[in-house]
Structure formats: structure tokens, C-alpha cells
Image: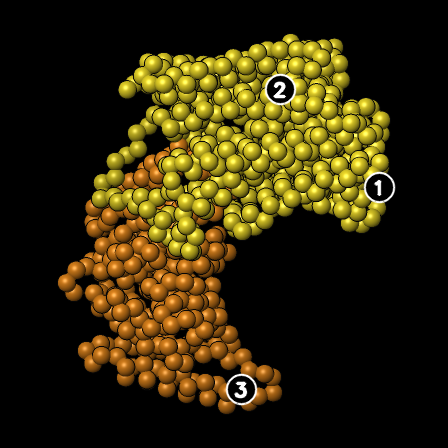
Amino acid sequence: MTHPAEPTAPLTEASRAIDGADHGISKKGLSAGSVGLIGAIVIGISCIAPAYTLTAALGPTVSEVGVQVPAIILVGFIPMLLVAFGYRELNRRMPDSGTSFTWATRAFGPWVGWLAGWGLIAATILVLSNLAGIAVDFLFLLISQIAGNPDIAGIAANPLVNVVVCLLFMLGATWISYRDMQTTQKLQYWLVGFQVLVLLIFSVAALVEVANGNAFDATAIDLSWFNPFAVESFSSFAAGLSLSIFIFWGWDVTLTMNEETRGSEKTPGRAATITVVIIVVLYLLIAVSLIAFAGVGDGEFGLGNPDIQDNVFFHLAGPILGPLAVLVSLAVLTSSASSLQSTFVSPARTLLAMGHYGALPEKFAKVSPRFFTPGYATIVSATVASGFYAVMRFVSENVLWDTITALGMMICFYYGITAFACVWFFRSVWFRSVRNFVFTLLFPLVGGVILAVLFFTTLIDSMDPDYGSGSSVFGLGLVFVLGMVVLLSGAVIMLWQWRKRPAFFRGETLSRAVAED
Amino acid sequence: MSSPARIVVGYIANDSGADALALATRIARASEAVLEVVIVLPSEARTSIVPKDAGYERFLRERSRTWLAEASAALGDDVAQSLHIRYAESFAEGLIAAAHEFDAALIVVGAARGGLLGRSRIGSVANELLHSSDVPVALAPSGSREVSPGQGVTRITAAVGTRPGADGLIEASVRLARLTHAPLRLLSLVSIDLPAGMDEELAELTSTVHADEVLLAARRSLPASVEATAVTAKGATIEAAVQSLDWHAGELVLVGSNRLATPSHLFLGSTAAKMLRELPVPMIVVPRTATPGATT
């Protein structure tokens, strides 16, 4: 790409790490290592946003696998973990803001790389619109709970009001991301702590209600819930898995973020482990307690009821917690809000990298000189996500549900490519050591194959108009149409860019490479 | 004068940064000072819910190098300069640290975030700096980038307050006038906005007398070798008083920081803030007690 002009005057650069240690948290009397660890866990949980993730994904997952949700949660973590190891290896070797895009281009050349970048951007844009949609629902629920008027919560169902409020949310999030506004660390800790605490209270309350015989559809907890082989069909299993990949999405950042920072070498690994243990325990607790409370039938509050599946906490908080339901609304709202900002970063940075390497117009590589954020890319991501949500809200009655399912598919797509990119990029060093063999070949390969199988199974199954929420277009399942539209429009834009910017597609700006040594 | 004075420029690759750079260049050329052009990037210690990304950090660093290189290329060779990338929790903190690092006599930043009608409004960045710097801070009004560097510094005006705290100001003004070979003008601003019913003539007389006394005291504190003119500006408000004066295009105005500021830290007082809104020329805010380090 364009080589930065060499400065004519002498230039000095302070090392970031040194400055960090001098002016940073260590100065405030906390040991660097422990802050690194707790901070990393907090960021990890905040990125995964368990309150938001569960309310969005639990219903669709139940609709696929019934009571075996806990099993699916446990199994779903495996491909995520395997791919995350590959992700870490790539990040260590080629740290680049373009992540999947850059790595796939390096390993497989510009075409595959472009599509991987597209998959990442599409997935994050889907989740942005879903996040904002969930936040809107809970905003109205919160207002109605505070005002004591249940009718207010129903306003969220009005598509026009819903879209307008959602766009306002997006506007706010864009503003915050563009200016890179930060919450204080303390507030961040409180928010995450609150989120985890509320989820605990929520599930314990559900179990207490079950014990008191007040459950809506008391279902006896059974060991078979944890048995993945009890799932009826492979299709359901695959669909459930691709959903559960979504619930762990974001966890991988804890593995990579602290790599070259202060603190001990073990910090990132430890932070990632603790984060995932907390998350898995929370998920299992919630899944088990809600199924025990509400069952998987399609009664009023049953988790199998399509009317509540796209946002289960929204419907179940009231019956379980009574007046305390307001806590759940607050937790989901804050969880979606704080995860909006970290979610915004990833499509923006990938777009920036694509602009930088000439895979997209150069405008995308613009960095705000004042806030040091990818300004143009941030605004484009926000605009597309808002437009997407607005259209979907009018096309589908179950927009949240369908976007989540399509999202699972997109994640499988670009994560799968990333995993294979890792395997291929490191092909010359596979057998240099046992470590290499495990982390650059075995784990990412198995993870990638699982994701590829999930992707194609979901793609084929979703052609059925009854798939997912049952929304359909032209006799095809909406999820399939959504996935295809996203991928094909990516291909079209890619061809257009190929015509306009052939340099990237000739590999002149970002060449293929193989890991050596 | 063993080594040349150093000026830290808080550079941002936009119009406001260009303003700062242009003003700093003008002062540096007039005083044979060295420019230390600094870009401050957010440090890792800054709390963030956005995960760190080594790749993006590297990209930012390279982008900043390009920005500095472009700025340096636009400056040309006639000003001694070096370029720096520093990390800090905030822009202001980074600049103050840089000023200490280089033992700089002055920090220059762009004041404006799109001030109305070409006049300065203080942006949040400049504001933070004004609240915490112990080094004089020059605020480049928007449009400074269009003033030719050849304009030089044609006059130094020290806006002398009416209460204690002027010592550092006088000292800094004298030093700057010497360095830039510019004449010094002492200014006392008098606003006559008294409650209705008071004898206006009497009030005017009192405040004018007071202003004259202040100027006299200031003059006395000048070293014997320094020539200075003195002027009293009168008006119904501070704004009107500022407007009633003549200003050179190449003029610099120095004001002392607020009495409420911690000693040797800046804080813009209300009079200075009002002046800033009206001044057509750059303003330099001097901490209440001059920095001992800046004795170049």
C-alpha cells in the first residue's frame, strides 16, 4: 500500500507499554498483574454480554433442541474454543486490525480474504441491529415497570415507534463510538457485577418458584438435559450449535487482548479461562432454571411459545421476579448498551483495514485525528445496521429471532474461514513442535471442520419455510434468504471492487504468505 | 540563553492542529525557538470497554507518523523541529508531560472547535489544558493557519490584572518580548458596569485611576532596560473594552491565570475568557507563578 512518507525531522516515539506503566493504573496503587486479570475478565464478560445474549438466544435454541439446551451450551463451546486457539496464533504472528480479513487474505489470497472480511462485517452488523432491537424492547419494558403501566411495554411492538427508537439508540451508540467515549473502570466493574448478580438472582428465584410449586410449567430437572445425544435430529443439533456459537462469540477477545501488555504471561490465558467458567456456569444456571420454571411447551410462558422466544427475559422476568423484574430490564439494557460499543469496534476496524489495503475505497481507512477512531467506517457500519434493522422490522414479525439464527450462520462462515486460514498459513511449521501441531493444525482444523459442517447444514435446512421463526419469502425460509442475500451481495460488491481496485485482487497490497521458522 | 527555547505543539491532524502549528511556527521563527511537534495517542492505561487490539495500535502509530511527516513537510526547513508520538490518558496530560520532558517554555494548541465568526471558543481539550498546565499555554484561534509565518511577532501585550498574580505574567511577557524582539505593551482593561444609580463619572474616574495605578506598578516592576508602552482600555463591558483597542495582526496577548487557580497551574478567569472571545489575536495564558524551569 502507500508507504508513509518518511519524516524529514527527527521523530521519537514513546513506547506505549512504558507510558502505560508510568501513568497508568499501577500508579494508583493496584498491582499491575491483578488489574490486568480482573480488567480482562470484566472486558470479556462485557463483550459477551450474557444478559443480552441469553435473552436473545435462549428461545431460538429451545425451539431447536428442546430441553437439551444445557448440553448444547456445553458442546457449543468446543468449536469456539478450538477456533479461538487458531485465532490467537494468527493474532500473535500477524497482529492486524483487519483480523479475519487480513489473515484469510494472507493464507488464501484476496478473494477468500475479502469474503471472510465481509462475513465478519455482516455478522457484526446483524448483531448490532439485534442488540439495538433488544435494547428497545427492554427500554419500553423498563418504563412500563417504573410507571406501573403494562401497556407501555406493548408500544415496542409498534414497528414505527420501534424503528424510530432503535435508530435513536444507534445514533447514540455511534456518537459514543466515534468519540471513543469511555466509562470509568469503576463503573464498568459495577455494570458487569450487576449484570452477573441479576442473572444469578433471576435463576435462583426461578428455582425457588419451582420449589414452591408456583412454576408456570414445572419440569423436573433431568440429567438427560446435559446429554447432547438426546437431541432428536442432527439438523436440530446443528442449528442449536450454531446458535450456541453466537452465545460465546466475543469470548475470544480475552485470549488475545492482553498478549503484549503488562502483567504476567499467564494473564490472558487465566482471564480467558475464568471468564468462560463464569459464563458457562451462568448460562447453565439460567437455562436449567428457566426450563424448570417454564418448560418447553408452547403455553403462555412456555419457552416453546414462538411469541416469547425472541426475547424470553422480556416475558419471563415478570412472572418470576414480580416487582423485582425491573432489575432484569436494567441488566439487559446496560448489558446491550455496554456491548454496543465494543461490538461497533470490530466491523469498523475490519472496514478500516480493507480500506487501507485497497479492498474497499480509501475513505474507509480514515482515522479521526481527534478521537483516533475509524470514523468513516464507524458511521458506515451504523448506517447499514440501522437500515438493515428498519427493513427487517417491516419484513419479518420475528426479526430478532431470524437475525440471531442468520447471525449464527455468518459467524460459522467467517470463523470457519479464519480457522482454515490458521491451518494453511502455518502449514510449514505444523510439525516443528507438539505445541505447533496442536494449536496450528489439530485444534483449528477440527474447529473449522465443525463450523463448516454447521454452516452448510444450517444453510440447507433453512431453505425450509418453516425453519426458525417460520417467516418466509418466496417460499424459502427467511433465514436462508437473509444468509444468501448477505453473502451474494458481498460477492457482488467484491466483483465491483475488483473492477475498480484491481491492485488488491492482484495481491499487490497484501500478498500471500506462509509462516516460517 | 545557552540553548534555544522549546515550544511544544499539541498537534492534531485537522484545522485546529494546523492553527496551532502555524502559530507555533510564527513564534518560533520570531524567537529562534525549536518546535517539538507532539501527537498524543490514548495510552493503554486509559480504561476502556473496547478490547485492545495490537494491530489497530500499530496502525494508529503509523498513521500518526504519516501525519507528523506531512505536517513537517508543510513546515519546511526554516524552523528547527522534531516530531514526537507520546501516549497519555488525555491530550492535555500528554502535552504537559511533553513540556516537562523537553523543558519547554510554551505549549501551543488550537483553541477552537469552530468558534463563531472567527472568534475563539475554547474547546474541551484546550479547556482541560488550561485547568492543569504549569507551563504557559498559547491558544491559536481558528484561522491562525491563514496568517503568514512571515508576519512574525510585532507586539507583545500583557493584560495586567488589577490584583496580585501579575508578577509571573510580567516576567513571561518581558522574556517573550526579548526573545521575539517585539515591543511590549502593558494593558489594563476597565469595564464600567456598575449598578444603575451610581455616579457614572465618579465610577469611571475611580476605575481609571485604579487602572493607572496598576499600570504604574507594573511598569515599576519592569527591568530597567525594558521599554514598554501602557494603555488603559475602557468600555461598558470587557468585550467593548477589548474592541476599543487597536490590534496588530502579528500581536500576542498574555494574560495571567485566575486567582482561584492552584499556584503555578493555569485556570482561565472570567475576564480572560471574555477577552478570548473578542480577541482577534492569539492569547497566551501564563500560570500565576512563572515556571522556574523556563529560564532560557
Residue position for label 2: A241
Residue at 52% from the left image edge and 36% from the top image edge: A274
Q: Up-down: is B183 above or below B98?
A: below
Rendered shade, chain A: yellow
Rendered shade, chain B: orange
Q: How far apart are marks 2 and 1 (CA)?
A: 36 Å
Residue at 17% from the left image edge and 60% from the top image edge: B3
| Label 3: element kind | helix
Task: Name the kind of residue labelled 2 in the image.
Answer: Leu
Q: Residue B7, image x and y in percent?
A: 28, 57
- The nearer-to-camera label among 2 and 1 is 2
Q: Residue B244 appears in which quarter of the rendering?
A: bottom left
Q: Residue A163, image x and y in percent?
A: 71, 34
Task: Name the kind of residue labelled 3 in the image.
Answer: Glu
| Label 1: element kind | helix
Residue at 44% from the left image edge and 67% from the top image edge: B268
